Image (cartoon, rainbow, N blue to C red):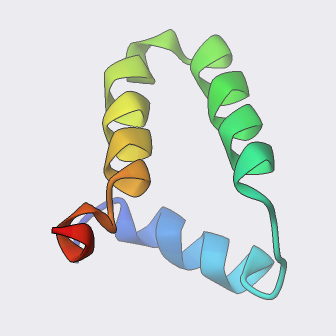
Amino acid sequence: MYFTDRGIEELADRRGAEEVSLSWLAERLREFVDLNPEFETSVDRLATWLARLDDDEDE
């Protein structure tokens, strides 16, 4: 188990039943980076990965 799995598990446990829009998620990611600029690269990589998840299926 990676250290980050605890945070992911907490997210799923506490908010797993909620539905959110991608616009809402993007705004929360922007807020997070504003508060924690040292994580800008990681958040950018996550957002890019999420944005491109279906790219392989289109080819």
Residue at image location 52% in from the left, 78% down from the top: 9
Relative image position of residue 3 (x, y in whole percent): 30, 61
Q: Quadrant of residue 55?
A: bottom left
| Picture layout, residue 51 above or below residue 31 | below
Relative image position of residue 50 (x, y in whole percent): 41, 55
Residue at image location 33% in from the left, 53% down from the top: 52
Residue in the foreground of this view, choosing between 11 and 58: 58
Residue in the foreground of this view, choosing between 12 and 58: 58
Q: Quadrant of residue 56?
A: bottom left
**How many marks are shown on the rendered structure?**
0
Residue at image location 37% in from the left, 70% down from the top: 5
| Picture layout, residue 44 above or below residue 7 | above
For the C terminus, which image quadrant?
bottom left
Q: Quadrant of residue 12?
A: bottom right
Looking at the image, residue 46 sits to the left or right of residue 14; the answer is left
Residue in the foreground of this view, choosing between 56 and 28: 56
For the N terminus, which image quadrant?
bottom left
Relative image position of residue 7 (x, y in whole percent): 51, 63
